[in-house]
């Protein structure tokens, strides 16, 4: 899972990887964005029960994909309303435990006033493109196929070898990612 861990840590969307057995659901890994949201440090959460954070417990069936509104209890015992997306992963370990990714979206008033805009705070367009593609779960091959842009061009954009794509290329990629062109390349103008 090295590639997964890299994406997991680079995205600024609060996420955690959980280990699901028949008896328990424990926290396997969290990213920095989740630690900022919850107030916990990664080492405090490692192997902790999910009940520590979420009162209305999620189903333990790791074969499900679902979304749910719930409450996250922070380190300071504050309760934050969150939207949770639970996604199973096709990874099992030696004792038949399964793994799932839980993605959190802060629904508190503070978050609505000042949303987490970490992707937009990244100044490197190549990194922003990688982050949006990871967030939308679109591979370079899928992007090339969906937009009819060569794989070579997609690769050069992702690696920063092309800093400013043509307007058409930028619009095709942004449309596939369901974002504005300026969310990836602020210097490329939207419109005709």
Image: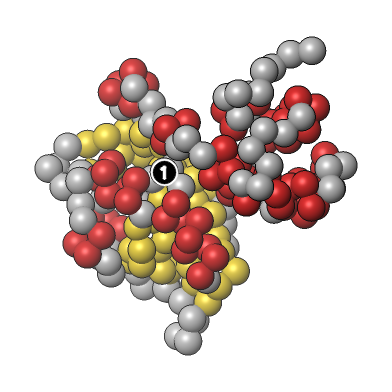
Neighbor class of circle 1 (other Cα within 10 Å; few <14, some 14-19, many 20+) is some
Q: Residue 66: image x %, image y %?
A: 54, 47
Q: Is residue 186 above or below residue 18?
A: above
Q: Residue 16: tell me if it is visible.
A: yes
Helix, strand or loop under label 1: loop
Q: Residue 42: image x %, image y %?
A: 25, 60
Which residue is the extreme one toward the right?
Answer: 148
Tell me what residue is drawn at x 52 percent, y 71 percent.
Answer: 1
Which residue is the extreme one toward the top?
Answer: 192
> Is 40 on the left or on the right of 63, as rendered?
left
Q: Residue 98: image x %, image y %?
A: 49, 72
> Is 43 on the left or on the right of 131, as rendered?
left
Which residue is the extreme one toward the left?
Answer: 76
Q: Is residue 170 above or below residue 38?
A: above
Tell me what residue is drawn at x 20 percent, y 46 percent.
Answer: 39
Foreground residue among 186 and 78: 186
Q: Is residue 36 above or below residue 48?
A: above
Q: Residue 55: tell me if it is visible.
A: no
Foreground residue among 11 and 123: 123
Tell me what residue is drawn at x 67 percent, y 33 percent.
Answer: 164
> Is 37 on the left or on the right of 4, as rendered?
left
Quarter assignment of residue 28: bottom left
Foreground residue among 66 and 170: 170
Pointer 1 residue:
12
> Is 161 on the left or on the right of 37, as rendered?
right
Placement of the C terminus among the 4 image quadrants: top right
Q: Residue 19: image x %, image y %?
A: 41, 68
């Amino acid at each position: 899972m090295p590639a997964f861990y890299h994406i997991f840590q680079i995205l600024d969307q609060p996420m955690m990887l959980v280990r699901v057995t028949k008896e328990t659901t424990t926290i396997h890994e969290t990213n920095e964005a989740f630690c900022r949201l919850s107030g916990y440090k990664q080492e405090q959460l490692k192997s902790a029960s999910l009940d520590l954070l979420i009162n209305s417990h999620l189903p333990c069936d790791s074969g499900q994909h679902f979304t749910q509104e719930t409450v996250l209890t922070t380190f300071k015992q504050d309760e934050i309303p969150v939207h949770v997306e639970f996604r199973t992963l096709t990874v099992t370990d030696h004792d038949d435990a399964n793994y799932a990714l839980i993605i959190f979206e802060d629904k508190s008033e503070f978050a609505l006033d000042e949303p987490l805009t970490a992707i937009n705070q990244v100044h490197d367009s190549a990194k922003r493109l990688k982050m949006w593609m990871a967030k939308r779960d679109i591979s370079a091959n899928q992007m090339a196929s969906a937009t009819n842009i060569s794989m070579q061009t997609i690769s050069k954009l992702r690696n920063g070898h092309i800093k400013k794509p043509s307007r058409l290329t930028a619009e095709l990629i942004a449309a596939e990612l369901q974002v504005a062109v300026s969310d990836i390349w602020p210097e490329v103008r939207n419109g005709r």
